Amino acid sequence: MASRVLVIGICLFVFQIVFAILTGSISLLSDTAHIGGDISAIVLLFLAQIIANWVDKSTGKVREEHYHNVELAVTAVNGLILLIIAYALLREAIDRFSEPPQVSSVILVPGIVGFVVNSLMFRMLHRGRKHLAVQSAAVHVAFDLLASGGVILAGLLIFVTGERLVDPIISAVIIGLIFIWGIWLIAISYVIFMGQYRESDAGIPS
């Protein structure tokens, strides 16, 4: 499941980065960067799955405590990656507000393709939502669905109005979503880890 989602995500990333470079759209670049975050989340998900398959030779059982701890670490790293991406995009978006470039409404094409492909990826990941790492990857993609919707909206508004500020404004909304999700991932990982730590410190089995 994760391997197929990863391949689809990489193909979408390459497709959108080409359009982002050709059109100069910061909103499309923001969406593409978020897809890069999706890819990193899925790669880290592979790491968690490797730990899940780590079998104790003496008992033949999966070391669940190790897997759960790695899940929390993977989720927190996902959040950190998103914050780094959002910061880099925010700096670029601020520059675009002062001198917004002319952006073609052709960004509608990668926006629609991104929306359709992200819908497919979300359905594939949603089936494995019982694990925290899979949940974080799935919500990564769900947020990217919103970002693709933003790109579609930007393309439509540019086509109708020709207003240059539409692109950086939509990008600012997408960047805000990336910031919110990154902070939430780090926070939820911390809360769950501290809850486990308190239970362990009190001698309560998890």
Image: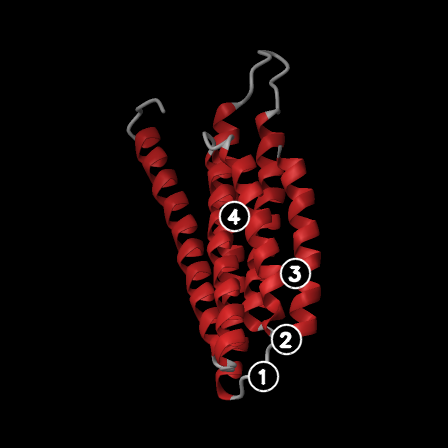
Residue 91 image point, x, y percent: 52, 76
Give the residue drawn at x 39%, y 51%. Answer: 184
> Considering only vertical position in the picture, is 85 above or below 2?
below
Q: Residues within 10 Å of mark 2 (few under 14, many from 20)?
A: some
Q: Which residue is mark 2?
A: 24
Q: Nearer the viewer, residue 39 or 102?
A: 102
Q: Nearer the viewer, residue 181 or 47?
A: 181
Q: Which image quadrant: the N terminus?
A: top right
Residue 137 image point, x, y percent: 52, 43
Element at label 1 = loop
Work out whether mark 3 precedes mark 4 in sequence or the reverse, and give the earlier one: 3
Q: Which residue is mark 3?
A: 16
Amino acid carrying label 2: it is Gly
Work out whether mark 4 precedes mark 1 in sequence or the reverse, and give the earlier one: 1
Element at label 4 = helix
Q: Label 3, label 4: how many angstroms apart (C-alpha)?
A: 15 Å
Residue 135 image point, x, y percent: 47, 38
